[in-house]
Image (cartoon, coloured by chain):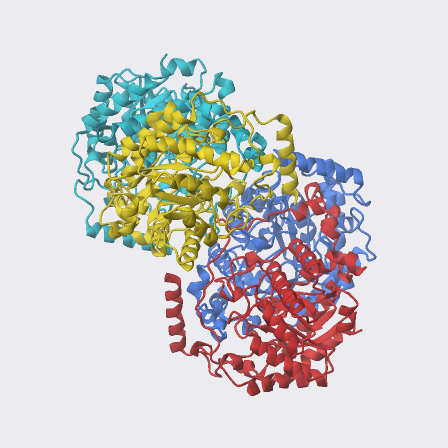
Chain colours: A yellow, B cyan, C red, D blue
Amino acid sequence: VGILERLSAGEVVIGDGGFVFALEKRGYVKAGPWTPEATVTHPESVRQLHREFLRAGANVMQTFTFYASDDKLENRGQTLKFTGAQINEAACDLAREVASEGDALVAGGICQTPSYLSCKSEKEVKAIFKKQVDVFLKKNVDFLIAEYFEHVEEAEWAVQVLKATGKPVAASMCIGPQGDMHGVSPQECAVRLVKAGAQIVGVNCHFDPLTCVEAVKLMKEGVEKAGLKAHYMVQPLAFHTPDCNCQGFIDLPEFPFALEPRILTRWDMHKYAREAYKVGIRFIGGCCGFEPYHIRAVAEELAAERGFLPPGSDKHGSWGAGLEMHTKPWVRARSHRDYWENIKPASGRPLCPSMSTPEGWGVTRGHADLLQHKEATTAQEMKHVLEMQKKAKST
Amino acid sequence: VGILERLSAGEVVIGDGGFVFALEKRGYVKAGPWTPEATVTHPESVRQLHREFLRAGANVMQTFTFYASDDKLENRGQTLKFTGAQINEAACDLAREVASEGDALVAGGICQTPSYLSCKSEKEVKAIFKKQVDVFLKKNVDFLIAEYFEHVEEAEWAVQVLKATGKPVAASMCIGPQGDMHGVSPQECAVRLVKAGAQIVGVNCHFDPLTCVEAVKLMKEGVEKAGLKAHYMVQPLAFHTPDCNCQGFIDLPEFPFALEPRILTRWDMHKYAREAYKVGIRFIGGCCGFEPYHIRAVAEELAAERGFLPPGSDKHGSWGAGLEMHTKPWVRARSHRDYWENIKPASGRPLCPSMSTPEGWGVTRGHADLLQHKEATTAQEMKHVLEMQKKAKST
Amino acid sequence: VGILERLSAGEVVIGDGGFVFALEKRGYVKAGPWTPEATVTHPESVRQLHREFLRAGANVMQTFTFYASDDKLENRGQTLKFTGAQINEAACDLAREVASEGDALVAGGICQTPSYLSCKSEKEVKAIFKKQVDVFLKKNVDFLIAEYFEHVEEAEWAVQVLKATGKPVAASMCIGPQGDMHGVSPQECAVRLVKAGAQIVGVNCHFDPLTCVEAVKLMKEGVEKAGLKAHYMVQPLAFHTPDCNCQGFIDLPEFPFALEPRILTRWDMHKYAREAYKVGIRFIGGCCGFEPYHIRAVAEELAAERGFLPPGSDKHGSWGAGLEMHTKPWVRARSHRDYWENIKPASGRPLCPSMSTPEGWGVTRGHADLLQHKEATTAQEMKHVLEMQKKAKST
Amino acid sequence: VGILERLSAGEVVIGDGGFVFALEKRGYVKAGPWTPEATVTHPESVRQLHREFLRAGANVMQTFTFYASDDKLENRGQTLKFTGAQINEAACDLAREVASEGDALVAGGICQTPSYLSCKSEKEVKAIFKKQVDVFLKKNVDFLIAEYFEHVEEAEWAVQVLKATGKPVAASMCIGPQGDMHGVSPQECAVRLVKAGAQIVGVNCHFDPLTCVEAVKLMKEGVEKAGLKAHYMVQPLAFHTPDCNCQGFIDLPEFPFALEPRILTRWDMHKYAREAYKVGIRFIGGCCGFEPYHIRAVAEELAAERGFLPPGSDKHGSWGAGLEMHTKPWVRARSHRDYWENIKPASGRPLCPSMSTPEGWGVTRGHADLLQHKEATTAQEMKHVLEMQKKAKST
């Protein structure tokens, strides 16, 4: 059964979690370029992560093709020995292999490009997308996702390219309630994406779960007010980000190597899943920071609605029930919902604050510092950004 | 080259990270019993984690045999379809398979038993250990580790059983600077373990890295003051635990399902590795909470001393250097040591404190509530512990 | 020179700080009723506090007549031996006595009444105000302030009563950027108050300084957009309240006996004074929590604009300069602006969070639980509110 | 009845609070020199503070003679127009005037001197003390206190000078459980002070209440173990200082102008008073940070033991009972002990940590940077300390 049939039938479709962050921690993705060449170099690591999300309850295996556009694969000194097509094809094969081990669909995904930030033309940007989409068609994925767009215009272009395939199209922006980088509201973004051809709209990445749910709620209000129809999706961060401005966690000083204290617990995920469901979102997954146990928590929270628990729950007692088997009596005493639902977990870091001040350099599309180039970042460029950083801190 | 030869030559030997916590998050271990039957049911998940630690720089593949003693495998309603021997044999095979893919030794590990807590005799407890050790001998592991003991007496018994094999023996207790559950100091524990036959002594689990290093430092002082000789090891938690008492993180209200905000960053691991090295510890690894990137950070900090970087560093620029390839200039500006070394990461949780009050029920060896039994915890037992919890909270 | 002349001339007029909180801590005001009978019972304590604010730089001595309306003076078991008139007269005498010791004006103040919350008629409420105003006229105060109103309607009534005297009238509501208890925006509140006759409008109490400044900024925008003219005042809390909803600090669980960790430093006050000045506010003072040194900090920040330092600065080196005289060299090293301007002071409370969840019972004007009555709160009433509290906490 | 008779009878004697910090905030003491010339320049401010402490329940009026030794009065550019004798005499008169308004004794106090830090001889230092003591004798105070000594040797000298008067002598050091600046333990300090002639020993200032109580407990153990006898006193800070090292709050980066978030609530004081009482301390007061309401909380906690409430409790319902008279029902719901006893007050400062790293320059008696001189701190000296500060921060 296809994605649209499932959603139209009112089914809850559970997405997978974040590949780049999880595989970075496992040693297969490089923070900085964040490209997915591991599909070729270490396929077993990608396959294993797919399997873990499947076991956790995911119904969608997204091809690990994030940032696998040709312009991104040769940005700032990146020296890969594989073509974009090779990486994308391997990603499709891995996703399909694992999807067929359970009840999951394969979704081919594309995302924002350096070309757009560099002000390339619509034609050029669409050509970049087209190359990835050709692989998805060849490998016959089940549906397509245009995700992680921070400018609605680029998202529209992406949707148009995907739409031409005849496959179902989902569109997901990395925005919060404040809207895209030029201040276009979630409501308007959603309307434009639906009009461009997306059957599913929503947000992913950049913000924490409840913030993302709030943004999708606004999208839904916009779509309904415009008399349009759509399904809704959400795939947020697994990091608490109460201190973000419009660009999300990229602007936090902790990004990307000191986000640990912000990681959500499984109990936070129960709240997220419930809230997303209440708002009317039915495609509920995760992005950066989501580990398999986070997805499992979503599946466990919605077990009653879905009618079943995920396979991975054979290793997890609901709401901590497994602790009844613990040796120590004071740990057994923690084996119930009331305990975990109300816990306020300490950071163990008395010298650290609970919020940060996000940076906001005001640098976006078209700015010289954002332009794509093949060569490595120069010492001159580094000196320049360090000066900007110093200036930003002092104000 | 064997473990003792390496350590005697002054080499830094890097241990692996924590299996039960990592595989719990991936969906293959159940929190509560924490037993390693995944070696039989999902060997690919165990193999993959071994590979990731190897890639991260680990020189030791510990068999995933934690809590795989027969008394623990049938505790409180556990209903496994495999014998302890099957689990232990599969674990040895997986560890050996991956170890042979790189420069690593296989270490067979045993740990504390419900039998000891239930006041079984020395003979009975040793018989439990012996069954695991027989597998290790059959599978010809490279050396043996008695780890995660909170009572020095039980640790001595374990060392004695291991010593009889003729293999090198390491002994590691889960204690902090305050000593074992009966107040035996780290200094005295170490002396007793060396006298029992351990060539390597140290601590693992229960406390954060700097606390564990402090405890091993005390052990070293004790051993040296007694005119004995030993090598030293440390395999701490990857959680900040400034608020623990003598039983470590088990007593924290967040254990085991809300420890996320306490997870160490890779930069915290640099400090840990440096401090451990300074103190004279040469077998440096991790326990619960350590993910592959944490071990890689240890290997990167000590790259100069070891003369090489781990394989996994091909996906990690030292001290954030990979961020030079990031698209956004303000993230590129974070690609240097000074930035990450001094960051005070926010928790993103303004409603949560930075420390907790640990529980301290005063329940230890011999207490009725600790006795092993095959049957599931009864409703009566649960009611009793919930009452104790309530009482503990009100004081 | 009168208040309007000063403001029209562009002078900065510095208000005094909070009497009820300061005198509660000194032992002369009872938290709960918060009434000012100390003007009669302990005039020396009131006189001394006036003097301290004068010394700190205040140009306005507000009569200590807060909540000195007859309906409030006999609310819920209050058993005072003085009439409202006696209290108000003594307050005027004390304010005048101290004002004449320096360059300060006397302002008579009235505030919200239980009668309004109890839905008494406009006529009845105005009669309550009138009784206080009669004393102010008899004692010939310099101008009048209607302050601490959370409903714009009651504030308008108050302004109308004050306006009839012919004295200059200031109107200050205890609202934040979200507006009054019925959602009337600060912009509209300001316009209505100006139209009712107030020459000075602004906010006081309930929120922290920067929030209050933001609210007055919105008021100013509203007044200017309506083509009206006014002067602006702000007298905020000296407590940080980032976690408040529309009713301000009353809803915080820490109100009123555990607000200590929120108290602003003198350096926070420098930022406040600067920000208020930038926005165009010229009557700048304080409310609950403001101690004399907070007002002095306002005066010191604006010393250049005003052309002089307050008398109290003879006991305070600007930006910590007095520490140059400290015995210990590491304290002398803290005697400069850069040090104090950037400090992030620790709470010393690792078991406490940085924010709270405000209560929001949704109880306002007209609700049975708000009705004024002379008798003490009954056991039945107490039982009822404790049940409501329990319910509020569980959601 | 004298102090020794009261203590011998088992009475609880309540001390007053901190004058220098309270009067600094009121505008009469300059932070840096911290000298008490306000006794001459603004006697009404000193008298009023005495009265507030008396009203709060204090049985001891300490003369406001802190740092009023002649060497301190002319340190580092201090240019006072009064002699030490004038300041001390005025202080005695004010204390006596207020003491006679209630049930209080007058205690003359001396404290550490720049002369000792500058390594002046025993004879010279004792001469300094003698000058203050002569005034106390002339003014016939009831007993004498040598307080705020961080070196036990100087404290002994002070006790010897006081002892010679024939008046009862109390000795109080500003140390914590780690002992004095040279590592002399609290136990040994206490024994030496008793042997020098002190009938009452204890600690004041530098640490928070529970830390000070712990230090006095150690003193008591030392005295009892030595077979000696003494009464015990404690007058701690009203600031939480969990992050201090041996020199106490002077080393915290927040000292002295950003300590606000650390201020204890009245409920913290209940715990303090109870704990001090339990340990056997009977002279219980406060030092820096203690405002009148803090002392009143001590008196209220021990009301049952003392048999009466302080006068100031007529404006304070026990454990928040006064809130029963509050207009708003959700505030009335806070009028009970259980609510306030368990509150964990938020800081309202999400950008700030809960603990700081104390400085520890290792500069103490005899160091060039500590030497007393009459002239103002030179630019050269300031440059030097700023360099030391920079160096201290970078390690």
Residue at the right extreme, as displayed: D81
State the quadrant of the C terminus of chain C: bottom left
Residue D274 place in picture, x, y as percent: 48, 59
State the quadrant of the N terminus of chain C: bottom right
In the rendered view, does A107 fall on the left or right side of A315?
right
The residue lying at 54 percent from left, 26 percent from top is A374
Q: Is residue B245 visible?
A: no
In the rendered view, does A288 fall on the left or right side of B121?
right
In the rendered view, does D62 fall on the left or right side of D186?
right
Answer above or below: position of C172 versus A318: below
> Of A249 and B320, which appears nearest the observer?
A249
Answer above or below: position of D240 versus B267: below
Residue D255 place in picture, x, y as percent: 64, 48
Please give the count of numbered marks on the rendered protein: 0
The residue lying at 34 percent from left, 56 percent from top is A278
Residue B267 place in picture, x, y as percent: 50, 32
Residue A193 place in picture, x, y as percent: 43, 48
Asked where in the image residue D192 lies, by quadrant, the reply is: top right
Q: Is residue B353 visible?
A: yes
In the rendered view, does C339 fall on the left or right side of D227?
right
> Of C242 and D60, which appears nearest the observer?
C242
> Of D161 and B158, which appears nearest the observer?
B158
